[in-house]
Image (cartoon, rainbow, N blue to C red):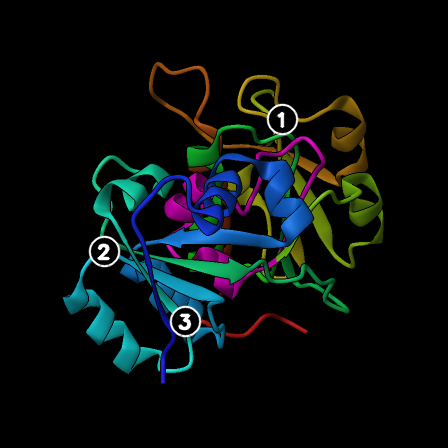
Amino acid sequence: MTTTISIESSQNAFFKTLKHLADSAQQRREKGQTLLDGEHLIEAYLAGGGIPIRLLVTDNQALMRWQTRCPQVPISVMAPQLLSALSPVKTPSGVMALIAVPMGIHLPAPHFSVLLEHIQDPGNLGAMLRSAAAAGVDTVYLSEGCADVWSPKVLRGGMGAHFSLHLVERADLIGIAARFSGTVYSTALDAPRNLYECNLTGNVAFAFGNEGAGLSSDLRAATHQAVRIPMPGRMESLNAAAALAICLFERVRQFGVGATQSPQ
């Protein structure tokens, strides 16, 4: 039988804990927990085998639905204004989940990876993870300076991508580039080689840098090949998330539309 707890006050100790998790990357790291906002994210987490620590709803109809969906998970019924205070969006969906942050692991031999250096905008980072998951990337490595990958805003932007990727935070990107058993690409406006001229069917990693500054000189030097994305229009550069999507899906196109396996 599901344990049900009602929370009506912002002075409730458990609510205060949740609010700290919603607002603080340090609290999320220390507790090893985060919040998922909305049915889509929760369903993606459940589909990956996750079991929430607790579900948070605002009405009895939602309570009954989630009691049936997750009979083993405790549920808190919260005043709507309290759930709104935890949500990263102006109009919350009415259900959230408290979860343990999945542990980042290193795959023995990643085939298709992304290295992200100092990506600081949560919306950009979420979009990049979403494109990576859609393209079949196996591992995403994030440097120390990236936005908190488990923040509610990044989770929201990722739309469930977190649960189909191996995410490694605070990674040594230069060391990873050196050990990668394939070609590590970077992008540059003045690179002599066109992205579409490259053979991307082997083991491939792409490195992308900060929205304004780009890759650090050290990481750029650690990559094997700089490529440029052709831009016949009158723009000087692309948004980092757009550049990432173009590169990843060029690899998908070369490897074969609909392919589900990485090359060995």
Q: Is residue 118 left or right of residue 161?
A: right
Q: How many marks?
A: 3
| SS category of the residue bearing label 1 | loop
Asked if one can make out residue 254 in the rendered structure from this viewpoint, the answer is no
Residue 144: image location, x then y, percent: 72, 35
| SS category of the residue bearing label 2 | loop
Quadrant in which the C terminus appears? bottom right
Q: Which residue is mark 3?
A: 74
Q: Which residue is mark 1?
A: 191
Rendered residue at 49%/66% (across/down): 53
Image quarter of residue 102: bottom right
**Disc 2 residue type?**
Thr
C-alpha distance separating marks 3 and 2: 14 Å
Q: Which residue is mark 2?
A: 58
Residue 145: image location, x then y, percent: 67, 30
> Comparing marks 1 and 3, which lies closer to the viewer?
3
